[in-house]
Structure formats: C-alpha cells, structure tokens
Amino acid sequence: MAQLIGIKRWLLLAGAVVLGTILLVPEKAPAQEEVTSAIRRYKQYEVSTGYYEEYEARPQRQRPFIEIPGVRRGVFPYSPTSASVRVRTRLSDSHLGIKFYNRRRCEDCHVTETRDIHTTRANLTCRQCHGGEPIASLEHYYSPMNPIRRHAYVCAKCHEGASASYASYVVHEPSAGSSLARTSFPVLYYAYWFMLVLLVGTMAFFIPHSLLVGLRELFTKKRITNNADSDAH
Amino acid sequence: MPTATRIKRFSILDRVSHLFLMLTFLIQAATGFSRTFYATNWGKKLSYLFGGYENTLVVHKWVGALMIAGFLIHSIYLLTRIQWRSPGKSIFGPDSLVPNFQDIKHLGQRILWFFGLGSPPKLERWSYWEKFDYWAVYWGLPLLAITGLMAIYPLATSQILPGWSLNVAVLLHRAEAILAVAYIFIVHFFIGHLRPTSFPMNEAMFTGSMDLEEAIEEKPAWVQRLKDEGKLEIVQGNPPARWYRVLYFIFGYAVVIFGVYLLINGIIYSRYVALH
C-alpha cells in the first residue's frame, strides 16, 4: 500500500513537471511558423519552378569583363563550406542566432542601407526585394539574392528584362569617398576623388584668378580714366 | 556706350549657340537640382515648376536630347571651320579656340600683372580663360550626355558594360553637373558681369560686336593683326538698338539671378541630401 502511494506521488510529481514545462515554454507564433522553416520555403520554390538544375543555377558562360564588386568569382573562389563558417554570406538564414531578432527592425542595424535611391525615391521597403523570413545570405546557393539568379528573381520584378550584368548595379552603394568604397568599389572611389579634385582645383584656381582680375582692373581702370581726363584738359 | 567704331566679335551663329546653351543649361540645372534635392522642401518646390517629380525627369531628358543635338551640330560646324588645305594653321592659329603655348605665356604674364610686376599680356582674339570656358563645356557636355544616356537606358548599357558602371555613371553625371553649375554660376558670371571692364554686363555675346577702343585695351594683338591684314574695316558692326539692349539686359539678369538662386540654395540644402 505504502508502495502504491509512493508511485502515485511520483506520478503526480512527474505530471506537475510536464504541465509546468508546457505552461512555461512559450507557444509558437503562427506567423513565424509559416516562414521560419527553410526546408518548407525552398520546397515551395521547387514546387513552383521545378528542381534546380545546374543550367538554372550557374551562368552559362563566364564573361570576363563583367564582374561584381565585392564578389570574387572565377579561377579560385574560396571554399563555400569554410566561408559559411567564417562569414554570414553563405547561410540559409543570414540572421541566424541574432538575439531578439524578431523584435528588431531592419533599419536598426542596416542604417545606411535605407538611404539609397531605391528606398528614398522609389519608396521600396526592404522586404520587397529581400523577401520574408528567413532572409538567406547573398551567397547562399539557393538564395533569390544570389548574383547568379538575382536579376531574374529580384531585379526583374520591376526592371523587365534585367540581366545578370544589370543586377550587378550596387543598390546599397558605399559612400563614394569612403575607405570602404576604396576596397569594395574602387572605380566609384577613384571617380569620386577625381571629380572632387577637379572641382576643388578649378575653383581654387579660377575664384582667386577672377578676384585678382577684378581688383587689378578696378585700380588700373581708375588710372586710365584719370589720364584721359588730364589729357582732355 | 554705343559709339561709331565697333568691331565684330561674334557671328550670329555664335550668339544663337550661346543663347541656346544658356536656356538649355539653366533648365537642366533647375530640373537636375530639383530631383537631386527632392528630399528637401526646396527641391519639391522647384519640381513644381516643371510639373512634379516625374515630369521634371521628362523635361530633363528632352532638353538633354536637345543639348546633344546642339553639340553634334556644333561639332559639324567646327569641322567646316577648319581650312582643310592647311589644317594645322587653322587649328592652332589665332582665330582658333585650341589652346597653345601663347596661352601659358599669357597666364604667366597676367599673374605677374595682378601683383603689379609687369604689363598685361597682349591678348589675341581668344584669351586663355575664354578658351577654358569653351573647352569646359565641350568636354563636360559629352560626359553628361553619355552618363545621362546610360542612366536613361540601363538595360542597353548593361549589355555592353557591367551593371555597376551605372553607379559610376550616375556619380559622374552628378559631379560633372555640380562642377559645371559651380563654374558657370560663379566664375563665368563674374567675368561676364562683375568684372570692372564688363560691369554691368559684357554685351558682346548679345550684340555680336564690341567697342573698338575697348578691343584695343582688351585684345591689342587681335586688333593689331586685323590692321596688318587690312581686315579691320570689314568687321565693323553696328551698335545695338535700344529695345534690343533693354531686352538682353532683362534676359541676362534674369538668368544670372536664377542661376545664383540655384547655386545658393544648392549650397544651403546640400547637407540634407546624399550627393553621391
């Protein structure tokens, strides 16, 4: 009898623990459940578009003159596995492991990215190009933002006929004069500094030049008119 | 001001070209600024002049097309001005706007003269700063035209060049526009209007002729050359009619005021927009 009471006590305790666990663990948010599964999301893509074939995922021919700033491709691209460990550019969810992620807004972290022409002039929101959760890394093999298919999956939504080359337009361009631009977009950086030096140089020469002409003529003019007056007398 | 002896300085074609450039440049500056500064109240107001943000771009594109046409016509005109029997002489001669060693010498002489260390250079028909004015437009216009066309036709551009060249094109378009606007609205306006010898306005670009005495003072070598060649009598022009003078004074000052207005507001509002 005493044994039975002991078992009952254990059962009650176990039940209380299970109940407590169920009550303590937060329930799943339905909206999140819909998008957080990467597998389900890519399954949807597969259903709608068929399986990814190699010809779909890789450009058919390499164009040597068309390259993308900040993206290294070609003879020695670095290993996709090691890269995914080091950087966030090859993850299926680029924001994986960020604390309080679903409480944050994009612009809390990506401040400068909200100041480009697409956002300020065309009033686009982040999601209109980057899609819903999870936002895959740019270099993730199945990401719509991957440069190998970005033109078709993202750009062509508005820019009909966009090509891979077209998609290499840098939407979130670095500040053209910054050291960041020097490494990530050198052509833009040097174009900026060339034009700035040209502007400052032209003005630094011609403004003093004009002022000196003005001053000199002001005084020379007076002398000439005085001479003319004295000649007339 | 109108005196009997005047000397011809600009042909009717020169003057029409300048008038065309004045109007198109001002419209491009205003439409371009209104779009660049659209995030500010001033930019919005400016765009209402041209019917709003979208219409402003339409105006900008069409006036740009006009400017390209003007540039091409002017280039063909330049080719007709070269005397093909002796191209070297006509290209590097004194009637040409091509810079030569004489200009560097004149610049040096003029800098000495600024500080009272010598006499002013004996200038020919075109002084070095006038040549600079001309070539600034002549290289700026194709740069703006090409980068502008790239921005109008991004898909076609990305067929020939990588797409990121559009970033560079837009940057260059903006930078060159700022350079041109700053140069014209500060330096060119100063030389044309505020400079003591031209104050209140250098009228040669509207009348086509200038006072002979003024020409002797300003461009002694040119007048001397015309005398030596016996062409001085041929190029005499008429003084402008009164109504015409009133007209171009009003027009010229309207352009100056609007240009300076754009420049000052551009400087004031530049901190509210990302210029690149």
Image (spheres, coloured by chain):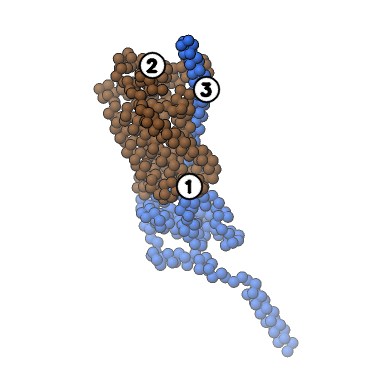
Q: CA distance from mark 3 to mark 1?
A: 38 Å
Q: Residue furthest left?
A: B85
Number of other residues with Cα within 10 Å of mark 1, as a class: few under 14, some 14 to 19, many 20 or more: some
Residue B242 in the image: above or below residue B165: above
Q: CA distance from mark 3 to mark 2?
A: 23 Å
Supply the letter of whichever chain is brown: B
**Any mark on residue B221, and which?**
2
Question: Quarter of the image holding residue A26?
Answer: bottom right
Write down the residue under mark 3: A215
Looking at the image, can residue B118 be seen? Answer: no
Q: Are marks 3 and 1 in contact (CB under 8 Å)?
A: no
- Chain letter of mark 1 equals B
Tint applied to chain A in the drawing: blue
**Any mark on residue B45, and which?**
1
Both marks 2 and 1 on one chain? yes
Residue B30 rendering spot, x and y as whole percentages: 44, 42
Residue A93 rendering spot, x and y as whole percentages: 52, 60
Mark 3, secondary structure of its residue = helix
The disc, 2 or 1, on the residue closer to the chain's N-terminal end is 1
Q: Nearer the viewer, residue B29 or A143?
A: B29
The mark closer to the camera, 2 or 1, is 1
Q: At label 3, which amino acid type do we have? A: Leu
Q: Are marks 3 and 2 in contact (CB under 8 Å)?
A: no
Q: CA distance from mark 2 to mark 1?
A: 50 Å
